[in-house]
Image (cartoon, grey):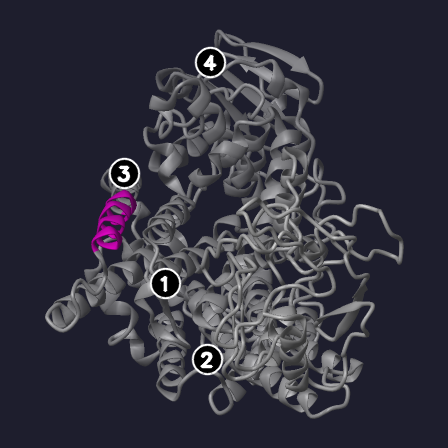
């Protein structure tokens, strides 16, 4: 091809390009994403920016083709009559190739062009050798107007810059950066920060105070300490704790929080036990927020809608009355396990079943998290277990129906993950249930009756009544609480803001109509169950479950079913808030410039802010009585007097230094042996009480002088011990009787 033909082809190509952006004869313009980057002719690299391929392809015309080496998948070799490349290959940019014309085809190697193919080359004229010698680079390529200077390869100005070779530290930094800005990392950090703020001042004096009161929280602080201690020292004695001596299976007298045992392995003594409890108290709120957020996101809600679901689930006003029950607040594993299972099965509420998104690993992880949640207690774990059993049954029916239409609708790997995960969950449940069946067998008085259920069943007004710990509604609802027989378990307000958002979600939502109906049905059913025997006498709701489902008769407080009501209301609210945010984006798209202004941004956060504000609390944080020095020196088996359900719970906490065997203990029921010990020791020290304690194996009796007032043991320190074979010793504020 002659020089004139090449120039003609160049003019034809330039005619098909827009008038703007044409490069002058002495410079080449690389247009990338609307940015003109000037490169001197014959330059050795220039500036390379990504993102311009699409624009360059548009410039190439409808019939033009560009073979750009690795981009198109072709490996065009360089011709022998073009000596302008040092490596024998050319990698021009698409913009340069497109400039060769609409019908022309630019080859990167520089072969002689025929049938309308344009030669590659701008202003550098390659020397030819007729004898087959190799082409030599560059007849004075013009670079800055200087002659005799080696210009290098002019084509490198148009080729992509080589990827930088990252060192291992830089790769690590980049990976950490991606992790830090990931949505789930930000959600976890936000959940933790919100938990610290919403539970304040829990972490202000974590070694000396407990939220709400120091009775049940002292018991649960001891539970965390005992499980960690015994698993490190003698795991075979896990269920025979140091309390309720000499009763076996005493650790199963109440929910154990066994899943927190790893935390119990750190630290020794009451102060460490209090610190551990307060940390887990805050983390439980954070996990509940994160779990509900993950579930809402998996089902198809937007970020703000999912945040509303998470905050409403963790900080519902009714949960403020449960601040002293860590086993009730430790509910974040429920939505998190459901989110993992839904993710593993490729299912969401908004998009339905998507087989390509199945992941066996997530499904198995969901079962493991569910098993961990069950290990925190059957109080809320048992309904969760029955829900999962129902889901498995429905899934089996779906698989049976679809097995002919869809080949392996669940997939072999997913089926194996579900099988193994389900076995793990069932094994954990069975292992945890054995001690409780033993306790029910040995202590018939531990079983709940329908009379107990009726005592704790809330009326319908409880769904609109907040506990005293609510900063917003506590004072306003004082009269309504006074009308409730047992308001700590009957104030079940999930939040008026949540009610309003969920009601709006019935009419304006990203969920399909049938899904809204299902969620509403779930809300109504769980509310009926939460009312216990108050809804139609419970004949069609709670009573059949109480009489026929194994373990259900151990649940004495139906109001805790409100946990499921709150979660379902949160999902309805998430659908409404997500639809609202989508509408805001549509309105923002009509703006110039097309992005939300500050007021529109603020409007999307209003529902979240209202939910958080309604969850503010005034929960008291009393100082826990200090451990008497005698508890660090006296050996067991021992009895600490005075003794009662509430008085014994701090005594259990005080034993976390040495875990001496003791008759004392607090739980959901009082064993007959403990009731007898309290009855026989009212007259202590006398012959009958001393003989009884010796036959029980008790060696020391510790009397706490400052706690005797107003108890049946008041005045016992004035009784003589002559002839009883008992020695008496004063240790600080306590008196020790050695039997």
The residue beneath circle 3 is 431
Tell me the element at label 1.
helix
Q: Is residue 3 above or below residue 58?
A: above
Dots 4 and 3: beta carbons under 8 Å? no
Q: How many residues crowd around disc 4 within 10 Å: few (fewer than 14), some, or many (20 or more)? A: some
Distance from the alpha carbon under mark 3 to that under mark 2 = 37 Å
Dots 4 and 2: beta carbons under 8 Å? no
Give the image quarter of residue 649: top right
The residue beneath circle 4 is 699
Magenta region: 412-425
In percent of width and height, residue 723 lies at 49, 7
**Is residue 201 toward the left or the right of residue 117 in the image?**
right
Tell me the element at label 3.
helix
Badge number at residue 460:
2
Tell me the element at label 4.
loop
Badge number at residue 381:
none
Distance from the alpha carbon under mark 4 to that under mark 2 = 52 Å
In percent of width and height, residue 661 lies at 45, 21
The residue beneath circle 1 is 357
Q: Measuring 56% from the left and 37% from the top, which residue is drawn there?
A: 221
**Which is nearer the eye, 141 or 560?**
141
In percent of width and height, residue 505 lies at 50, 85
In percent of width and height, residue 289 lies at 56, 60
**Is residue 77 toward the left or the right of residue 5 in the image?**
left
Q: Is residue 424 magenta?
A: yes
């Amino acid at each position: 091809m002659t020089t004139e033909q090449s120039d003609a082809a160049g003019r034809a190509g330039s005619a098909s390009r827009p008038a703007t952006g044409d490069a002058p004869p002495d410079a080449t313009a690389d247009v990338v994403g609307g940015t003109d980057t000037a490169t001197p002719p014959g330059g050795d690299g220039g500036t390379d920016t990504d993102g311009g391929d699409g624009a360059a392809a548009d410039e190439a015309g409808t019939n033009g083709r560009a073979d750009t080496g690795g981009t198109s998948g072709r490996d065009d070799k360089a011709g022998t009559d073009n000596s302008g490349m040092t490596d024998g290959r050319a990698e021009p940019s698409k913009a340069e190739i497109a400039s060769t014309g609409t019908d022309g085809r630019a080859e990167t190697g520089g072969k002689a062009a025929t049938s309308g193919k344009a030669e590659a080359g701008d202003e550098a004229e390659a020397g030819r050798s007729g004898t087959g010698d190799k082409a030599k680079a560059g007849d004075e390529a013009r670079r800055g107007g200087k002659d005799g200077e080696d210009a290098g390869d002019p084509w490198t100005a148009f080729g992509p810059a080589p990827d930088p070779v990252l060192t291992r530290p830089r790769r690590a930094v980049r990976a950490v950066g991606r992790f830090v800005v990931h949505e789930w990392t930000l959600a976890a950090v936000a959940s933790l920060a919100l938990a610290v703020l919403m539970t304040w001042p829990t972490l202000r004096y974590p070694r000396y105070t407990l939220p709400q009161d120091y009775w049940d929280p002292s018991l649960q602080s001891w539970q965390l300490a005992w499980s960690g201690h015994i698993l490190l020292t003698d795991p075979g004695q896990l269920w025979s704790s140091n309390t309720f001596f000499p009763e076996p299976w005493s650790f199963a007298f109440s929910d154990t929080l066994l899943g927190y045992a790893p935390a119990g392995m750190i630290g020794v003594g009451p102060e460490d036990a209090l610190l551990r409890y307060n940390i887990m108290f805050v983390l439980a709120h954070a996990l509940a927020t994160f779990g509900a957020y993950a579930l809402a996101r998996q089902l198809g809600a937007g970020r703000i809608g999912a945040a509303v679901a998470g905050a409403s689930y963790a900080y519902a006003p009714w949960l403020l009355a449960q601040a002293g029950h860590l086993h009730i607040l430790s509910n974040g594993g429920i939505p998190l396990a459901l989110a993992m299972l839904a993710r593993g099965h490729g299912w969401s509420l908004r998009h339905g079943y998507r087989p390509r998104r199945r992941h066996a690993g997530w499904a198995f992880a969901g079962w493991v998290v569910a098993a961990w949640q069950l290990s925190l207690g059957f109080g809320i774990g048992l309904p969760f277990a029955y829900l999962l059993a129902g889901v498995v049954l429905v899934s089996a029916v779906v698989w049976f129906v679809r097995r002919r239409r869809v080949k392996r609708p669940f997939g072999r790997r997913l089926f194996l993950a579900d099988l193994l995960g389900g076995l793990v969950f069932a094994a954990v449940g069975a292992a945890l249930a054995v001690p409780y069946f033993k306790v029910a067998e040995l202590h018939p008085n531990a079983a709940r009756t329908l009379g107990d259920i009726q005592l704790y069943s809330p009326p319908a007004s409880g769904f609109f009544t907040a506990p005293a710990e609510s900063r917003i509604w506590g004072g306003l609802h004082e009269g309504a609480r006074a009308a409730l027989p047992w308001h700590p378990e009957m104030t079940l307000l999930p939040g008026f803001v949540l009610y309003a958002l969920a009601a709006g979600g019935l009419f304006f939502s990203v969920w399909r109509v049938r899904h809204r109906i299902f969620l509403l049905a779930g809300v109504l059913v769980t509310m009926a169950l939460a009312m216990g025997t108050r809804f139609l006498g419970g004949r069609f709701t709670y009573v059949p479950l109480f009489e026929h489902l194994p373990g259900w008769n151990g649940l004495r407080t139906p109001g805790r079913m409100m946990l499921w009501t709150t979660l379902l209301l949160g999902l309805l609210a998430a659908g409404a808030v997500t639809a609202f945010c989508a509408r805001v984006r549509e309105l923002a798209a009509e703006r110039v410039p097309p992005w939300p202004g500050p007021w529109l941004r603020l409007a999307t956060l209003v529902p979240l802010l209202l939910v958080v504000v309604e969850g503010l609390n005034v929960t008291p944080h009393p100082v826990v009585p200090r451990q008497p020095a005698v508890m660090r020196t006296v050996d067991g088996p021992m009895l600490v007097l005075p003794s009662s359900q509430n008085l014994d719970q701090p005594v259990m906490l005080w034993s976390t230094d040495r875990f001496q065997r003791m008759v004392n203990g607090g739980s959901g029921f009082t064993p007959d042996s403990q009731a007898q010990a309290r009855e026989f020791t009212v007259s202590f020290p006398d012959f009958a009480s001393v003989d009884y304690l010796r036959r029980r194996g008790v060696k020391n009796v510790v009397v706490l002088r400052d706690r005797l007032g107003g108890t049946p043991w008041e005045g016992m320190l004035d009784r003589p011990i002559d002839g009883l074979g008992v020695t008496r010793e004063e240790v600080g504020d306590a008196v020790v009787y050695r039997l």
